[in-house]
Image (tube, coloured by chain):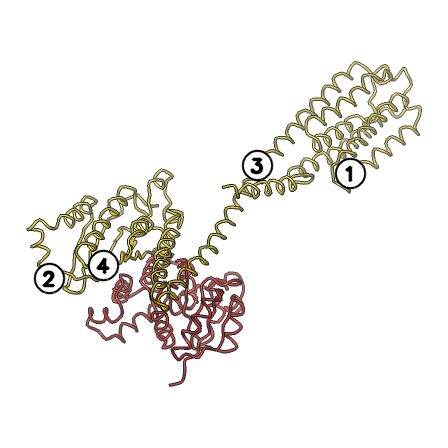
Amino acid sequence: MNGSGPAVSATRTTGAESTSPISPILTAFSAGATWYRVLALFYVFWSVSRYSEHIIRPWLVATVFGVMTAWTIFSVISRRPSLWRVVVEVLIVCLGLIASGWVYPEAVRAGGVPTLTGIWAAASVLSAAVVGGPRLAVGAAAVIGAVDLLEPRINNSSTIEAVLQLLMVGLLFGWAVQVMRRLHEQLLAAAAVRERMAERERLNRVVHDGVLQTLAYIHRRGLQIGGEAAELGELAAEQERGLRALMVTSPALDRRPAQASGTARQKSEQRDVGADLMALAADRDRVEVVRPAGAVALPAHEATELRAAVAACLDNVEVHAGPQARAWVLVEDLGDEVVVTVRDDGVGLEEGRLAEAAEAGRLGAASSIRGRIEDLGGSASWTTTPGRGCTVTLTVPRPAGSLS
Amino acid sequence: MTTTTVLVADDHPLWLEALSADLAGRGFEVVGTAADGPSAVRRTQATRPDVLVLDLNLPGMRGDEVCQAISDLDTHVLILSASGEEADVLAAVKAGAMGYVVKSASSDEIVEAVVATARGEAVFTPGLAGLVLGEFRQMRQQAAPEATPVPELTARETEILRFVATGLTSKEIAAQLVISHRTVQNHVQNILGKLHLHNRVELTRFAFERGLGSVDDAQ
């Protein structure tokens, strides 16, 4: 468990790096601020032009507009929000505001005039929000507001409203940026977790393959060398079987989700018969489970009963078929029914012995198998030949509507 | 009879050595070895062995990609796998492999499988038979009416496949069905043939749909 610590923190670091200046969300916000700045510039030009006949220092207007235009063009060409840019832009706005006090004669100013920066000032607050969230945005708005309010030449009745609006924009936009940034971080973290899981799974497969291969090799060499080495080899073979069974049983129903689809409720009640039987056979030595590539889904009740019936069959094989008998469990999905065939290569029975055994009360297991399967509406049949083992076929209908 | 030539591809050096030694000891001529997918393909193309014994999980290429890449050669492919990743085995068999043996099989079983593969006989484990059975059923279930016709197994082929899947050897199957061992083998080969054919048809269709024009491009 300790081993996973460094890996987690390492991924965090990369996650933070990729969020930093230009994550897609910040890029989008930043682009919004940039285009606002362009549109605002034209609006400011237009609103000031309406008062052009009153302007007494055209060179000052031209200078301020020149700087604003240059800055706007620069921000369109190079879109990398940063702290120094916020500072410079706030400075431009403040100087523009102060200059606004000197371009109109006093008589005109008293009636209320547009400032040279106007709504363009909000662009700097938006940029501050992108760079530093609500705090920097409100800070920028506060600086601009302070200049606005404290410079008596531009202060009029509507100034306080403009300042409050600027603060609100800073707060809201900054807050939105912050929320989006957190969401984006969570998204990145989730993606990193998924990637890590996939990578771990891949590594697991590689490791398992190597381990299984080595165990198979030890088994093989042990048998060749003989003596105690053969015992070691047997041990290795046993471990190999265990590990292999463990590997194929773990992912229960996710092997072919398309087949097992349905409503969510039904899906949650489905079980993969193949995986179930695989798990059942995992601790039995001479049993092989054969199944299709995809999951064979049955509702939980049917699957549990079927599993119990197969377990009883395998118990029977262990007790009656002889010590050397091997068994195979074949799982087949016929669409409207699931067929499980349990065959052993043991001693088998004379024809008619089944009936005899039933009469003698020795077929308890077999009748319980039949009982379970018939309760599900299915059927169980036995065929046996002396010396050629015994085959049990269990057919369970798939309840209507349990799939698709 | 000329000696059977074999190329062994496995990324596990000890295993590669042991298997090559075993095969050489049984009179096979091991014409080469390879430790990764691309070199397995190159060396198979260069030496054209009778049998390629191919580890399913080679670095560089998947097992089915290797089979696909050499499908124009006469070389028969026998898949060896340690982990028995079922879906991967099925993909390789669909791509042209003739048989499949689990690595935990005894040395004799593996040699026997190579002999059978060299003769052009399909080597089925019960597990592979179960997968193939499932594959044909799935093809039938998913077949859309306008799609290419899906190959179907005859009743006899299904019966034989079910016997293989429950652990019967082809001799036992022959005895049970009162037919010759050769007939059983023919049925098994037909089953594989249908699977390969279907795979080729699907590949061609895929290539045309993607505007690739010919199957060679898809390979």
Residue denoted by label 4: A343
Of marks 1 and 4, which one's residue comes earlier in the chain?
1
What amino acid is labelled 2 in the image? Glu
What amino acid is labelled 3 in the image? Gln
Residue denoted by label 2: A350
Marks 3 and 4, how far apart at CA: 53 Å
Of marks 3 and 4, which one's residue comes earlier in the chain?
3
Callout in the foreground (3, 4): 4
- Left/right of residue B164 with respect to residue A124 in the rendered view: left
* Residue in the picture at 34% in, 69% down: B109
Label 4 marks a residue whose chain is A
Residue denoted by label 1: A75
Label 2 marks a residue whose chain is A
Label 1 marks a residue whose chain is A
- Chain A's colour is yellow
Q: Is residue B39 above or below residue B89?
A: below
Marks 3 and 1, how far apart at CA: 29 Å
Callout in the foreground (1, 2): 2
The red one among the chains is: B
Of marks 3 and 1, which one's residue comes earlier in the chain?
1
Of marks 1 and 2, which one's residue comes earlier in the chain?
1
Marks 2 and 3, how far apart at CA: 68 Å
